[in-house]
């Protein structure tokens, strides 16, 4: 097939005829992804309000720290199979290599199962030590163990949503997310009505994770049966030519996941170690509100990563640049007003939602807003790098930002508490974004 200028078009280019079609695809999928994230975020917001109000600062801090440790160990071992699934499965489907696609799904699910089981065992073994040093309650190791059970079941669904999105089942994912969020809130509300303690709410979390995994697994199997049933017996051997590439990608994303502990789990753990559960609770609430603009970025990442990987494979670089430039303008118009409104209303918002005892979270909330908004506007930087096959370099950029964050956490948290933690985490977002955009500018992908 040849273009109008006589040059040969990339394979598969005929599937994208109108210049606006890629953007329409992104907008359509993004609308479902944003709607799903809005439901999840709304549910998480209500969950935070219910739990913080029911448990109070100290008990809520214990609850948060128990879960943070269990999820931290999981993230420590996690190979981020979601990102590998998105990139490789999108490529295999674009090339109509369905045997490799089926083999990939089975291999990555098995990796998740093994990693989750090992993480559960490590948390159980270390829970006695952690209870005294992290929760400041030596006999509360059972709380960490219950949290680990919930994390285990939640991790089994690591790639389910990813597979649905690669197959463009964004609407199905939204429906499942809405149903499981309603169920989760219903269980928590019942716990509040029955005056549950930390133990009760941890078991509620286990039940919610089991239900969510069951729903997503069932939907994923339906889609896979329709698309890849004939190739269900495909073995790992069909991936022989891609083994090295896949291993390198998984190792890079594993390191990236480890580094993300600093901004998603490790920060809370450090605050718990060098501070108190109360300080950890204040910081957790600040993060819940202060990083809320990222809720726009996460679903957009999910929406653009599969087509970016497909377009890069097909040589459609211009499509990627067109989408990134247009979405940057749109997201800036959404994220900046939201951030300004949250900053201005931070203290009364905290007073009304989680109570006056959490009002000290206002300043770290504002700091986090200022640091995360640029990353929201340029949400596409990491998926572009991953699509280019530069997972290792992207991980290196995250490493630099995370190293700075960790150093600042130990320096700033003891004297400044939650405010120091917010400054530390904010530095990671800013430095990582600066390094990434500078590289993409050199590669002429801005």
Image: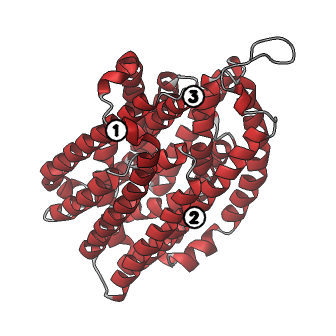
Q: Return the mark for residue 387.
A: 3
Q: Which residue is mark 1?
A: 232
Residue found 37% across the figure and 55% down from its top: 217
The dot on residue 153 is none
Look at discs 3 and 2 and give the one toward the viewer.
Answer: 3
Above or below, comparing residue 212 to residue 434 in the picture: below
- In the picture provided, is 377 more to the left or to the right than 168? right
Q: Residues within 10 Å of mark 1 (few under 14, many from 20)?
A: some
Disc 2 residue crowd, few under 14, some 14–19, many 20+, Cα 10 Å: many
Q: Quadrant of the rendered structure where residue 106 is? A: top left
The mark nearer the N terminus, 3 or 2, is 2
Tell me the SS state at disc 1: loop
Relative image position of residue 5 (x, y in whole percent)? 87, 14
Mark 2 and mark 1: span between their CA atoms?
Answer: 53 Å
Q: Which mark is residue 362?
A: 2
Residue 227: percent from left, percent from top: 47, 43
- For the point 63% across and 40% down, the residue is 304
Location of residue 340 with respect to 156 vertically, above or below: below
Please identify the residue farthest to the right as the structure is shown.
5
Residue lying at 34% horizontally and 43% vertically, measured from the top left: 75
Choose mark 1 or mark 3, whichever is in front: 1
In the picture, which quadrant includes the C terminus?
top right
């Amino acid at each position: 097939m040849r273009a109008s200028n006589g040059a040969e078009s990339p394979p598969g280019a005929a599937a994208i005829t109108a210049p606006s079609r890629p953007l329409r695809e992104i907008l359509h999928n993004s609308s479902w992804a944003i709607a799903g994230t809005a439901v999840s975020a709304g549910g998480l917001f209500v969950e935070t309000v219910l739990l913080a109000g029911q448990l109070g600062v100290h008990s809520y801090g214990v609850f948060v720290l128990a879960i943070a440790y269990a999820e931290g160990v999981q993230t420590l071992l996690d190979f981020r199979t979601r990102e590998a699934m998105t990139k490789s499965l999108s490529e295999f489907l674009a090339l109509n290599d369905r045997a490799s696609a089926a083999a990939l799904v089975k291999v990555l699910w098995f990796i998740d199962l093994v990693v989750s089981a090992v993480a559960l065992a490590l948390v159980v073994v270390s829970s006695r030590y952690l209870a005294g040093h992290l929760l400041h309650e030596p006999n509360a190791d059972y709380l960490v163990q219950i949290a680990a059970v919930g994390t285990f079941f939640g991790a089994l669904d690591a790639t389910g949503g990813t597979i649905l999105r690669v197959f463009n089942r964004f609407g199905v994912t939204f429906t499942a997310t809405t149903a499981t969020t309603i169920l989760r809130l219903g269980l928590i509300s019942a716990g509040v009505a029955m005056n549950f303690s930390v133990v009760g709410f941890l078991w509620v979390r286990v039940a919610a994770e089991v239900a969510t995994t069951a729903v997503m697994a069932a939907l994923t199997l339906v889609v896979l049966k329709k698309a890849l049933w004939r190739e269900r017996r495909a073995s790992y051997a069909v991936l022989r030519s891609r083994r090295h590439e896949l291993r390198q990608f998984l190792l890079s994303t594993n390191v990236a996941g480890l580094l993300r502990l600093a901004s998603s789990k490790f920060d809370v753990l450090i605050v718990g170690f060098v501070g108190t559960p109360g300080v950890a609770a204040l910081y957790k609430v600040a993060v819940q509100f202060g990083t809320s603009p990222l809720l726009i970025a996460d679903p957009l990442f999910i929406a653009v990563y599969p087509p970016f990987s497909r377009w890069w494979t097909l040589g459609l670089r211009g499509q990627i640049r067109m989408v990134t430039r247009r979405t940057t303008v749109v997201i800036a118009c959404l994220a900046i007003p939201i951030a300004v409104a949250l900053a201005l209303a931070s203290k009364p918002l905290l007073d009304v939602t989680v109570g006056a005892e959490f009002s000290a979270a206002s300043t770290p909330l504002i700091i986090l807003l200022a640091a995360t908004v640029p990353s929201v506007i340029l949400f596409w930087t990491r998926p572009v790098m991953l699509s280019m096959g530069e997972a290792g370099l992207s991980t290196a950029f995250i490493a630099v930002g995370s190293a700075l964050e960790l150093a600042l956490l130990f320096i700033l948290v003891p004297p400044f508490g939650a405010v120091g933690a917010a400054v530390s985490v904010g530095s990671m977002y800013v430095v990582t974004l600066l390094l990434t955009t500078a590289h993409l500018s050199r590669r002429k992908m801005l």
